[in-house]
Image (spheres, rainbow, N blue to C red):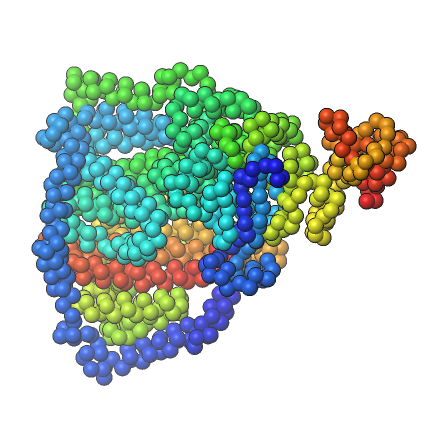
Amino acid sequence: MSDRETVISCRNAWKLFGDNPKKFFASMSGSESFDDIRRAGYIAGVRDVSVDVGRGEMLVIMGLSGSGKSTLVRCFSRLHDITTGTITVEGDDIGAMSERELIALRRSKMGMVFQSFGLLPHRTVLDNIAFPLEMRGQDRHDRRKRAMEVIELVGLSGREDYFPRELSGGQQQRVGIARSLAIEPDIWFLDEPFSALDPLIRREMQDEFLRLQQMLSKTIVFITHDFDEALRLADRIAIMKDGAIEQCDTPDQIVLNPATPYVRKFTEDIEKSRVVHAGVLSRPLNGAAPEGEPVQASATIQQLARQLVNDAREDLPVADADGALVGVLNRQQALDVLLGDA
Amino acid sequence: MADVTADIEDTKNGLSSTRVAQILLVAAVLLAAARPVLPEFMIRVPEAWIPPFAQWLDYFFNVIVIEKLKIAVLTRWFAEGPLEFMLNTMANLLEGKRRWPFLGPVPWTAVAAVAAVVGYYLGGWRMAALAGGTFIWTALIGQWKIAMQTMSVLSVAAPLAFFTGLLLGITAWKWELVNRIIKPVLSVLQTLPFFTYLLPAVIFFKVGPTAGAVATIVYAIPPMILMTTLGLKKVSPEVVEAGKMAGCTRWQMLTRVYLPAARTEILVGVNQVIMLCLAMVVLTAFIGMPGLGAKLLAMMGSFKLGRSFEIGVTIVLLAVMLDRLSKAWVVKLPEHHEKGTPWWKEHVVLLTAIGAFVVFLALAQFVQVFDHIGRKQDFSRGKEIDTAIKGFLAIDTVQAFTGWWRWFLNVWILIPFRNGLLWIPTPAFILGIVAFSCWLGGKRPAIYAALFFSLVALSGWWDRSVITLYAVISAVILSMFIGLPLGILASRNERWSRRILLACDTAQTFPSFIYLIPAIMLFGVNDVAVIFSIVIFTTVPLTRYTIEGLRTVPPEMTEAADMSGATKRQKLLTVQLPLALPTMAVGFNQAIMFAFFMVIIAAFIGTQDLGQELQRTLAGTDLGKNFVLGICVSLMALSFDLTILSWAERRKRALGLA
Ligand SMILES: Nc1ncnc2c1ncn2[C@@H]1O[C@H](COP(=O)(O)OP(=O)(O)OP(=O)(O)O)[C@@H](O)[C@H]1O
Ligand SMILES: [Mg+2]
């Protein structure tokens, strides 16, 4: 990620829930486990997290329920004030921002889709979606027009005058998505945004966000429980446990080289061949390239399965999108990944 | 379970509260038994020891508040300026008082028509009939003018109480410190008898409607504050976060996120404000506010039962109508219009209302009965009803019946009980109360009870306080004999529970004054009538919460009893009642609070309690005395309130119901 400008930078962030977290933190030695902290009457929502998110990157956060995903994202947007540590957004320390600066930041740069939607119960679909635009001071006509566009996009045309309680769960979620799409923020926090959607519309929405991210280089932090979704979207995946990030890396690395036993267990059931790309598995060229037809670096091992089984060569050349050779793929190693003995 | 855990908790720091209660009780009994040999100062607090609270308060009000701080200048300015202006405007529109804007009175048909349309909008044809019908009845029975006098004050007081309550509620929600200060003040305010509001209102806000309106407003504010804070606290955190992420400023947050999202609770507050305002406006008759209350007071005073009855019906109809309409507003959530609905269709209700108003306004110009019902045109049957009621009461069996009850209650229950209470030496009485409080509620409420009752003893009004307490206790006990069986019977059957609950809810909306009418009819003007009216008034919450408590017992628990072969009686006694008790306690508590309220109101029938003295102060400017009396009532009521609610709370926690 070194080629990307850092947008969100989080350094040693802690978020403790309890009566007097600051005081408690000062009394901590630093080696307390999650359970030690809980016995003292505090919950460690975020535990010593350091992570950077670059411009145009999609960071997917995964982890079991209660592992602190939503809390971390709330810290990024300063819906929670962190107990200690620093979080900067585009170089500005958000913890030090005044209320006015924070409002300006949120109005101009940030958007969020909430896990349980957070729709305003007294506003219609249209008015809910136009709400952030209203706060930005856009005039009535423009925001109505924009809201209608995104209503169309999320497939809620004809329901714009409904109230949230008149909609199904999935429809409500789409209103939440539309509300954040309407402002197309530079920095996007999506907390399980598609959890209530049917597979078809979910795929459409994923495509839409991918399109926006690639075209307009949006920075997205995305929470999901669905590994397939994570694979489709993620540049990097962060796996959380008890408030801490266990590992934050590309999907390939997470399945190939799990950093902790927990991550290994977490990724155990995933078919690695669907995750690992030829480019990642290959070794450097070191001068001599094997001959013959190269395989694409961006192809997953699964996509190459037929070729790997039928090809007789020991090593296969790997080429990037432009056709230039970038490495050598050991067929046996790839087969191991494919068959699951790696 | 509850007692066990509570005891364990208590024994950690010494004696258990049950043990303390026992010791206190023994001490109280010993003291009482020793009465003949006790020195005088142990029986009653001697006059000389009584601090001049009233003078101090007088000094505080007259010298500090009025002379030094010149508060009265401000309040009088408000009373004579904006408040009187609003009252006059409404009075002109509704009853035709000759004041700016010189437009009124609006014809009764127009008011009734608009009310019907509003009723239809909020709750369909039934509400339309109720709203329209109430006004039609009022006009036809010949009470339009006095009813409008009441309504015009109500229509000023309720919105003012609403806005003040909303504002204070928001402040208390925003700043914890304000909340801490406001909470105890509110509980005192809510137990302070209404008469205590009236005199300061008169002194600070001028005699007449203005003072009445102010007292009404102040009385109606507390529930609005509580509902507002409750509603704001309940707004879902994600909705708040959504607002923050949209970049709302604080003001936008409040007006576009919090307040609209707390709509339901705020509207419940509106309902309570309206009902309290109506009840209080009626009571302001005691400081000479014209209207339904004053008329009722006059009619009852001259024992014109027929007219009293008719006014009672009007008040009840108005109360039920206002209650139902405002409750319908609570549950009426906005609904979308299909796309392409024409403009007039979206506003059809508003247009109909305006149309109806204009049509009847025009009609009234030409047809007199559409404008107002003349003197000889009304359908009042006051005389006939009067004769009928008096005839009924004169029937021998009826007379024998009421006479016997009057005699029985007086001679065998009330007078002995009262004399007994008065006989007990003050310290023994206080010890007894504290023992009760300790046993039931634990040590904290007991400490409060000790403090509060000692203050009452030092107020110099001990005997009258005891008489007040006697009326309250005897009425609540008597109403238990009616309310509990009624509640238990009704709760056996779903249909009956619903009916009785509805009846109770309706009865609770009646202004308390109404309950005096049947009491006076049956028993005339005496002690028994007072007790009787309190009994009817307090039976309502007792019945209501008994049903509610029994109905909300979790089904798996009654099923467990059924499966172990319990008979209906066993099930009731061993499973349902114990589980329902915490809820029933809330009803019991409410009954006591209602009784304290009612006993003071009933004073004009001629009792010897605090209410009587309080009412007397209304004629003068005796602010200090007025406050001392009011606070005596409040302190006694609060002691019970704290004790019973603490018990209910502990019990609920122990049963895992909270
Ligand atoms: N406002 C709060 N006050 C106290 N504790 C909180 C608060 N918010 C979250 N927590 C605690 O912090 C921990 C992490 O919660 P969080 O909502 O971040 O989990 P999550 O990973 O998003 O779970 P899920 O997948 O179920 O959404 C939980 O133990 C939760 O109880
Ligand atoms: Mg979450």
Percent x, y of residue B504: 37, 46
Q: Is residue B658 above or below residue A239?
A: below
Locate residue A78 relative to residue B228 in the image: left or right. Answer: right
Residue toward you, B281 or B622: B622
**Furthest-front residue in view?**
A287
Q: Is residue A270 above or below residue A295?
A: below
Residue toward you, B504 or B92: B92
Residue at the location (18% across, 79% down)? B40
**Furthest-right residue in view?**
A312
Residue at the location (40% across, 32% down)? A135
Residue at the location (39% across, 65% down)? B441
Q: Is residue A309 visible?
A: yes
Residue toward you, B186 or A340: A340
Residue toward you, B629 or A146: A146
Q: Is residue B524 above or below residue B160?
A: below
Q: Is residue B404 visible?
A: no
Locate residue A247 relative to residue B449 in the image: left or right. Answer: right
Locate residue B235 relative to residue B199 in the image: left or right. Answer: right
Residue at the location (19% across, 57% down)? B611
Q: Is residue B114 above or below residue A227?
A: above
Percent x, y of residue B631: 22, 60
Percent x, y of residue A109: 47, 34
Residue B571 occupies which quadrant of the picture?
bottom right
Q: How many marks?
A: 0
Percent x, y of residue A17: 50, 54
Locate residue B594 relative to residue B67 in the image: left or right. Answer: right
